[in-house]
Image (cartoon, coloured by chain):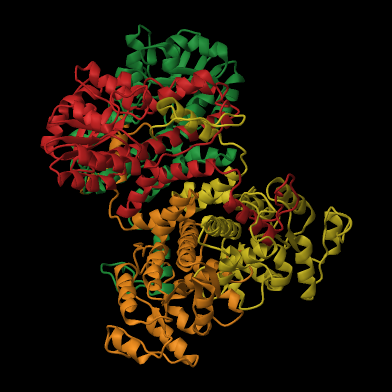
Chain colours: A orange, B green, C yellow, D red
Amino acid sequence: MGFNMRERIRAAGHDVVGFDRDPDVTDAASLAEMVERLAAPRLVWIMVPAGDPTRRTVAELGELLSAGDLVIDGGNSRFTDDTHNAELLAGRKIGYLDCGVSGGVWGRENGYALMVGGAADDVERAMPVFDALRPEGPREEGFAHAGAVGAGHYAKMIHNGIEYGLMQAYAEGFELLEAADVIKDVPAVIKAWQRGTVVRSWLLDLLVRALDHDPELDDLRGYVDDSGEGRWTVEEAINLAVPAPVISAALFSRFRSRQDDSPAMRAVASLRNQFGGHAVHQAGPTSGSGSTQG
Amino acid sequence: MGFNMRERIRAAGHDVVGFDRDPDVTDAASLAEMVERLAAPRLVWIMVPAGDPTRRTVAELGELLSAGDLVIDGGNSRFTDDTHNAELLAGRKIGYLDCGVSGGVWGRENGYALMVGGAADDVERAMPVFDALRPEGPREEGFAHAGAVGAGHYAKMIHNGIEYGLMQAYAEGFELLEAADVIKDVPAVIKAWQRGTVVRSWLLDLLVRALDHDPELDDLRGYVDDSGEGRWTVEEAINLAVPAPVISAALFSRFRSRQDDSPAMRAVASLRNQFGGHAVHQAGPTSGSGSTQG
Amino acid sequence: MGFNMRERIRAAGHDVVGFDRDPDVTDAASLAEMVERLAAPRLVWIMVPAGDPTRRTVAELGELLSAGDLVIDGGNSRFTDDTHNAELLAGRKIGYLDCGVSGGVWGRENGYALMVGGAADDVERAMPVFDALRPEGPREEGFAHAGAVGAGHYAKMIHNGIEYGLMQAYAEGFELLEAADVIKDVPAVIKAWQRGTVVRSWLLDLLVRALDHDPELDDLRGYVDDSGEGRWTVEEAINLAVPAPVISAALFSRFRSRQDDSPAMRAVASLRNQFGGHAVHQAGPTSGSGSTQG
Amino acid sequence: MGFNMRERIRAAGHDVVGFDRDPDVTDAASLAEMVERLAAPRLVWIMVPAGDPTRRTVAELGELLSAGDLVIDGGNSRFTDDTHNAELLAGRKIGYLDCGVSGGVWGRENGYALMVGGAADDVERAMPVFDALRPEGPREEGFAHAGAVGAGHYAKMIHNGIEYGLMQAYAEGFELLEAADVIKDVPAVIKAWQRGTVVRSWLLDLLVRALDHDPELDDLRGYVDDSGEGRWTVEEAINLAVPAPVISAALFSRFRSRQDDSPAMRAVASLRNQFGGHAVHQAGPTSGSGSTQG
């Protein structure tokens, strides 16, 4: 993603020196060399995995950069990390912005939506880069200064939580269409939702695209990973005492998708067997008999 | 279950003539013979599967019985069937009660809890049988006249809906204990909840019993059937616009437990692959690479 | 909506005779006059409330129309009604199509997405009207022949079920943004999601529009009606044993939104008070003290 | 609760010196005096609010106690606090056990169920106190050594998570009984579940008790606090990737119960108004008209 973003910024006429551990794509041999090759005041965009890698990179940059430089964390960091990063750099008079980025593999072509947290003057200084990265069209439709440090990653976290709910809603609808005898052409129905309907969206377009390649989506398994923001969203809902039944249901459906067998449902099966003599499915194959209630 | 109930009523000193299609357990060769061998006014207890079998039996009894007789449907009929059954019999001056029965395979020994719908004088007439069937102790702790025709099965339906929620709650707790490294002895923890805790219950006792035989519950699979009342409960919640997040979550967990692979989660996996280049698990084996968000 | 559709069909160059009970908008004084003024073979589009009004209109048209005519139910009928309607008309050699329509108040301008169930030759005959109603662009992106009779309303029902889930996902995200201290400008964040993000959609555009008028959405109350399709979707999920945790959570959230006080939560409050001495909020005002667990 | 536990331990014949900030119930004027008045090796039971108060008390005891003493945290601490507490005391050769306690206001009479984490020899040393506190009956039905340090509080946390689910299940059932016209006597139905049913439990007995005092539970409001363990349980489900749809639904229902109006449902209402012209309820009073879909 960092690679694509560099290309987009360069295409807008800016000089960019990139550092990546992969020698095939990097412009500089080290973070230090990268810093050296940039004229002050520098603007450094971090795009590495959330957590330790980002924290380590911020710390290293704190050693290398000078007062007046500006660091932007454009990765998927948890918003609670940003305060710490900002304070660390502030001690050396280095500015800090956090920037949530949405756009995935399509961003190089379509532009990246940006949600930014930090001080207004830092945001102002970085605006040429933000303008290079964001989609065509009115700035405010693909860019927001959401608040102080942390607000950008917070906004991106919520964006992703919503995304979980949206995908699960389409997914349940897909399964209900698949399961109905009366529907003869599921992909045609979903394709017909692309114009004029209430449910039209970019995700719907992608679903149509996926169905074009695989009309019953049976080339793949219903196994879904998660990369953290959905969990953080639900944890934040808990912290704030905000009901989040849909986002949490979407998250738990992912967890369930990764289980071959459910320990919880083994407990339910064993209880039904205990009180009702209900048949259980043995751990090997087979089934049983019986049943009265439950 | 009908067999066990007959035995319990007989043990209380009542004459019972049972009819069952199984010649090994029946007392009469046909429903007609059964009716013939009973002196009027008769009390006939129906204990057959819900739906058509019960409706057919009620219709047949309508032909065979006389004015002043009383029919009790003790099966798991949907409460909406009761009005029809009662009207059919009322046309012939035959009384009708619906009776929800809880107790499962333990009822013969412990007694059956009874929830009854119908006219007060019909309930009064049948009370000796209800008293024979219900558990020891104060009548009102194992028997209720819940309302007019349908109320008994309605109450039983809700009882079962609650049961779904209770079982799922214990089941989630079981899985959370199993998943935690810090817990060394899951069965010991659950056994220790039997006295003094807020969560003690008969279902908990049954879970302890199941764990005594199979401490990790891995002799069986997490595959859970449902026999209708949970579905009806959620449908009734929808009819009445009553939020039922827990009972419905328990029901959907059962549905999910019976799927080898989830079509919905295939849709989510395909969407993540489309927008983020996230790896998918192929329908055969394997996994992939990549990932940026979601 | 019927009015807007008439205008759109007329604008495409078709003759339309509309009947409405409102004398200000109707073209004919009665359904009979409307039929009389149309040359056979006629195509009659029904756009009246689901349930009895639609069933009565179909029955009346069965009396008025001739063999070879074609009726299209474009209302929000439950798909299970369609078979009955089709059979009634088939007895008189009148064709029947069911057509789910999406587009709301925006349809006159944007066109209406159409999901149709019925026989292929009936669909073919009605295609000029469908083409007049559907949005600009490739036909298959705003029109689908989904299957046999019932398939159109089934597809529309699922469309609406998905819509419930999508709206609830955005809504939870909105509340989580509102609740966070770090976010200073909620409308700006949501507006910035319109381009380049994974969550961009027409519903998101509408949310932006709503926030333009009322940045905290506090001119209205969080009271949400439902018009049936969401309930039917969850009932169908139950019929088909398809897990639908997100769509049902969205439905239940609407039910809850219409309650001033929750009887269920009164039960939970009373239980906590019983076992833990936890304070309860009296039905009038005030609160209390205490607490140990739960 | 500490007071009641002191009485129960004394009643078993042990010497207890209690310290409480309330001069009316304390035995010692300070923690230091309390320690001084106990002969080594001492066993000190902490029963103060979770979080800072407990952590401070552990730290203070670390200063006051001697090698060979043993501290038991019997409060509702989060299990993740225990490792830190144990390490702090281990540095001074003081033992540490964490003990989850269930029983509420009924514990003094019925005994307290105990779930303990820590080293086996520390558990052994404290067993006379555990035996004094736990309910009558076999030790393993009211006491468990669940695992290493933290296991006791973990087990208690899960106990409480289950409790949330159980209460919500009964509560939904209560509301469904209340809402049904056919049920004439809700308290009678629930009372009748006390014997012989699958749903009988101590919580059910408490619900009967509450209904005896207030048959429609309308002396109180449906406002439900939470004291942390439910949140921690869902957070732990997220950490462990365990689906917990029921426990989370119960938690979110509590959050919702504390909102006068739902920001999320304002967003849904505004969306429906945008696309369908659906009436909204104004923030003051009133309603509106209109509607076509959704």
Q: How many marks?
A: 0
In percent of the image, x 25 and y 22: which residue is there?
Answer: D135
Residue C213 vertical position relative to residue D210 in the rendered view, above or below: below
Give the image location of residue B153, x and y in percent: 49, 27
- Whether residue D231 is visible, yes or no, is yes
Residue C237 vertical position relative to residue A20 in the rendered view, above or below: above
In percent of the image, x 18 and y 27: which residue is there?
Answer: D38
Give the image location of residue D75, x and y in percent: 31, 35
Does residue D233 appear to the left or right of B120 in the view shown? left
In percent of the image, x 23 and y 23: which residue is there?
Answer: D16
**Residue nearest the viewer, comparing D246 with C221:** C221
- Whether residue B26 is visible, yes or no, is no
**Residue nearest the viewer, comparing D232 with C58:** D232
The quarter of the rendered structure image containing the N terminus of chain C is: bottom right
Give the image location of residue A120, x and y in percent: 54, 74
Give the image location of residue D289, x and y in percent: 76, 50
In percent of the image, x 38 and y 72: which residue is there?
Answer: A91
Does residue A226 appear to the left or right of B80 in the view shown? left
Q: Hey, which quadrant is residue D77 in on the image?
A: top left
The quarter of the rendered structure image containing the C terminus of chain C is: top left
Does residue A152 appear to the left or right of A52 in the view shown? right
Residue A57 vertical position relative to residue C5 in the rendered view, above or below: below
